[in-house]
Amino acid sequence: MIAAAAADAKRCLVDDVTEISVENGTLKSVHPVYAGKVLSDVSTEQRLTLVTVRSRAFAAPTPDTSKSGDVILLRPYDRRSNWRPRSRALKKPDAAQLSF
């Protein structure tokens, strides 16, 4: 779902992050690949970036009992009422454009 949301919003997606920081407006993160045998440094300057984190990669925050808030119940937005099917006409490529 998040990959589709990033594509729809035309935004960068960095997934499975184990380290994250922001330096001079640049989001820097570490993304493990090959079962964690290689660590990939990922950076983006895009203002809105969608990020998922690896489970248990970050420590859980300590509860602050001095803070409180009110619970507000909201009804979920029903997209079905505004749903319209989208379709795109696909063009068949010329044989000259294909390479094998």
Image: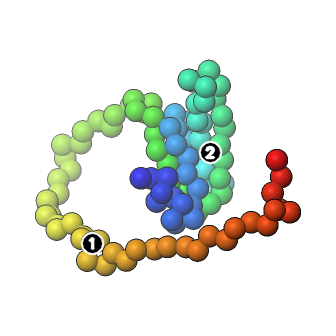
- Three-letter code, disc 2: Lys
Left or right, 100 with reference to 3: right
Q: Which mark is residue 28?
A: 2
Of mark 1 and mark 2, the one earlier in the sequence is: 2
Residue 94 placement: quadrant? bottom right
Q: Residues within 10 Å of mark 1 (few under 14, many from 20)?
A: few
What residue is at 58 percent from the left and 74 percent from the top? 89
Q: Which residue is mark 1?
A: 80
Side of 92 relative to 18 (left or right): right
Nearest to the observer: residue 5 or residue 59: 5
63 or 77, which lies in front?
A: 77
Mark 1 or mark 2, which is nearer to you? 1
Scheme of image coloration: rainbow
Residue at the far top in the pictured view:
37
**In the image as oriented, which residue stretches furthest toward the right?**
96
Residue located at (59% from left, 41% from top): 29
